[in-house]
């Protein structure tokens, strides 16, 4: 049983059905439904979708490219560049509003053979002990309540996960949680399909952003650590208004735009190190606190963890794996995501230091190699262990023109 049919839940279900395992997904909403998000499909997410056997070319025809980033710190230099990998090759991300992407993904998950039940809200989970099944209480669309049992439960039900709550994992510590708000603005023309980041020393490591998701439609928002908001005695809405007043380019971009209503949410950062497997329950995506601590992206980690959860459960259910699948999953997902999360947490700490950021930006502005490295880290255009390897760091320092020598 998979609770939640977002990217993590669908990836889990697809990994199971591709192995011939029957699976049911319970989704509390009805598609298409919105999910507050930055709407970015990173290269790692695209690779996971392809590995799950999904029609990537069909998706590509519907997305909008995000080819680079423009970073602005109030009172300091602006830095911008296209996203490139550690060999210097251009590597764009895709953007697509989540109400469109999640509906597309859920539709293909259902076509692959998964049983998807919408408007089914899980209100309570009793984790199985030993060989006993898990028991779930589900509220249906008409308000009636039914009980469901399952050999295993995968919690992919988001940042306020009922599965994580009943597993005793839902904590949201302020120093590991981001609070954010987002809207869509229409009639906005950007000079190029870049993510634009606007920040100020008091917001770091948080920021405001504008991200194109269509020809004249942008995803606009602001996110800060919950501990930052508490220290400032403010909230994301007030902080965005202040940013709009103090940052002329941000204000200029938004002049004359048609705004949709704001929506707020919180992101459980992976630095929380939440236990993601226990007994007969596995946690995936936001339910497992897998949001990248440096950039706030989470779709790619949810897809990767879902693929891993489905593969491990398929091995166990087919008899090809002995031992406890939850323990194996917890260990393997920590190793898989740790390659990105550990350096990501270090980058977050560095990004929280205004003096260091003020020093780094002018250097990146005039130095092509450092500028390319900075934007590759912001855009996840290559894996961090590749970007931060001694060999690549040396090559970046020695790169004095836009043309990159392959390393």
Image (tube, rainbow, N blue to C red):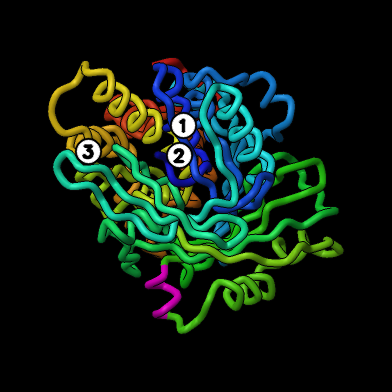
Circle 1 residues within 10 Å: few <14, some 14–19, many ≥20: many
Q: Is residue 383 above or below residue 27?
A: above
**Viewer-nearest of labels 3 and 2?**
3
Position in image of residue 400 (x %, y %): 48, 29
Q: Is residue 227 magenta?
A: yes
* Residue at point 39%, 22% (across, down): 21
Q: Is most of the magenta stretch helix, strand or loop? A: helix
In this figure, which residue is indicated by the disc labeled 3? 326
The answer to whether the residues at label 3 and label 2 have Cβ atoms under 8 Å apart is: no
In this figure, which residue is indicated by the disc labeled 2? 8
* Residue at point 77%, 47% (across, down): 190
Q: Secondary structure at mark 2?
A: helix
Position of 8 compared to 365: left or right?
left
Position in image of residue 241 (x %, y %): 65, 75
The quarter holding residue 62 reads: top right
Q: Is residue 1 above or below residue 223?
A: above
Position of 346 compared to 157: left or right?
left
Position in image of residue 229 (x %, y %): 45, 75
The answer to whether the residues at label 2 and label 1 have Cβ atoms under 8 Å apart is: yes
Q: Quadrant of the C terminus?
A: top left
* Residue at point 46%, 53% (across, down): 158
Q: Which mark is residue 11?
A: 1
Q: Is residue 46 magenta?
A: no
Which stretch is magenta?
A: 226-231
């Amino acid at each position: 049983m998979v609770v939640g049919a977002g990217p993590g839940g669908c990836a889990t279900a697809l990994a199971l059905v591709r192995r011939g395992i029957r699976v049911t997904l319970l989704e509390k909403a009805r598609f298409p439904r919105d999910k507050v998000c930055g709407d970015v499909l990173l290269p790692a997410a695209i690779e996971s979708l392809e590995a799950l056997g999904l029609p990537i070319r069909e998706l590509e025809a519907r997305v909008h490219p995000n080819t680079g980033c423009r970073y602005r710190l109030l009172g300091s230099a602006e830095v911008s560049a296209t996203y490139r990998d550690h060999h210097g090759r251009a590597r764009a991300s895709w953007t697509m509003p989540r109400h469109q992407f999640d509906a597309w993904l859920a539709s293909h998950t259902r076509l692959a053979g998964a049983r998807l039940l919408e408007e089914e809200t899980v209100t309570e989970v009793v984790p199985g002990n030993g060989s006993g099944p898990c028991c779930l209480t589900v509220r249906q669309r008409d308000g009636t309540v039914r009980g469901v049992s399952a050999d295993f439960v995968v919690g992919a039900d988001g940042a306020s996960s009922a599965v994580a709550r009943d597993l005793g994992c839902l904590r949201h510590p302020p120093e590991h949680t981001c609070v954010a708000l987002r809207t869509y603005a229409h009639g906005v023309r950007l000079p190029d399909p870049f993510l634009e980041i606007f920040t100020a020393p008091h917001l770091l490591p948080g920021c405001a952003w504008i991200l194109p998701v269509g020809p004249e439609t942008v995803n606009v928002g602001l996110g800060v650590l919950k501990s930052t908001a508490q220290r400032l005695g403010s909230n994301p809405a007030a902080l965005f208004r202040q940013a709009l007043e103090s940052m002329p380019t941000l204000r200029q971009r938004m002049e004359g735009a048609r705004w949709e209503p704001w929506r707020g949410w919180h992101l459980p950062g992976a630095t929380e190190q939440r236990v993601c497997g226990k007994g007969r329950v596995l946690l995936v995506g936001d339910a497992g606190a897998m949001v990248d601590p440096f950039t706030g992206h989470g779709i790619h980690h949810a897809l990767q963890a879902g693929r891993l959860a489905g593969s491990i459960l398929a091995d166990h259910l087919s008899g090809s794996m002995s031992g406890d699948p939850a323990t194996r999953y917890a260990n393997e997902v920590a190793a898989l995501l740790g390659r990105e999360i550990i350096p990501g947490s270090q980058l977050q700490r560095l990004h929280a230091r205004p003096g260091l950021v003020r020093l780094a930006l002018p250097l990146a502005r005039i130095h092509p190699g450092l500028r390319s490295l900075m934007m590759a880290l912001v855009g996840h255009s290559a894996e961090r262990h590749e970007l931060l390897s001694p060999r690549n760091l040396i090559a970046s320092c020695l790169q004095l023109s836009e043309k990159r020598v392959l390393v």
